[in-house]
Image (tube, rainbow, N blue to C red):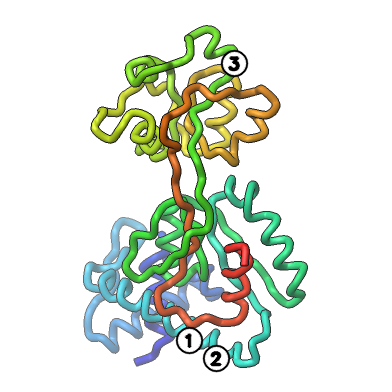
Amino acid sequence: MDLDLLRTLVLAADAPTLAAAAKKKHVTKSAVSQQLKALEAQLGMPLFERVGRNVRPTPHARALADTLRSAFAAVDDAVEAARDVHGAVRGTVRIGAPRPFTAAVLRARFAKLLAAHDDLVLDIVFGTPSELEASLVAGDLDLAVLARAAEAASVEATELFVETFEAVAAPRYLERHGTPETADDFARHRLVVFARDRPMLTSFWRAAFGARTAMRGRVVASVASLDEMRALAESGIGIAVLPDYFVGEALRRGRLVRAFRPRRPARNPIVLAWRRGAAGSARIRAVRDALSGG
């Protein structure tokens, strides 16, 4: 069995089109099609079916690709560790992280790390926790900073940082609408939340009013961007629940004020994650230590 053909299958199964898979592999679309046909001949089964002008993997091909993805990630880890026998911190480390946390906390650590190792290259991408963890499991990332606990059984993690959520609003908003003192007060306010699942508001509500108190409120904006949430809050639209490190300057400058102080702080751990059993090359260890503050 030609392992390169199996790698092509994984790429094609993950990509939206064969053309996209070909671009990622740096070959032509025709070359990818030929490789898939060769693999189908070796396996004696169809792997892709045509849907309109495009093709998609069959259920059997999807299942095979899912198994191969983690297997290839383990192989790549082992090969990279073998190349690193002298313990030199060199080469590329692929890292995924939340953009605001990177700007506030990780940027200085990245700069210090790169200054210490001339032959190290950091390939940094941004995304949501679910996107980053999926890329980590697939082998597209070496490390991932997640703003929640890791969920995949194949992933290990260590606590990197603990953020505290703050309910903030513009001073003029609270002058106009009043400062909430109870759960009922809070629920009557205009709320700016992060995405539809409202993870930060949920955590804050439980800390402020207890898990048994049903979360409610008048959501006027749902946006998957901390920057936009802060901007809306500063413009007087409503109350937003955001990480402390992200609103610190706005609080110091008076653009925002705390709208409610819960008895128990609403805390959330941010973790550094990697594939379970991944070989610890020198460069991966160096990055892990640097991001952990070691």
- Can the viewer see residue 33 in this picture? no
Task: Give how far across and how far down residue 64 sits, in percent.
Answer: 28, 76
On screen, 243 above or below 234?
below
Circle 3 or circle 2, nearest the eye? 3
Q: Are marks 2 and 1 in contact (CB under 8 Å)?
A: yes
On screen, 51 above or below 138?
above
**Tag 2 residue:** 82
First reached walking from the N terminus: tag 1 or tag 3: 1
Looking at the picture, which amino acid does disc 2 mark? Ala
- Quadrant for the C terminus, please: bottom right
Label 1 element class: helix
Looking at the picture, which amino acid does disc 1 mark? Ala
Task: Residue at 60% x, 71% y: name it.
Answer: 93
Looking at the picture, which amino acid does disc 3 mark? Pro
Count numbered badges in the picture: 3
Which is more toward the observer, 256 or 136? 256
In 3D space, how far apart are the residues under numbered discs 1 and 3 (Cα atoms)? Answer: 55 Å
**Tag 1 residue:** 78
Query: Label 3: how many residues lie within 10 Å, few (<14), some (14-19) or many (20+)?
Result: many
**Tag 3 residue:** 171
Label 2 element class: helix
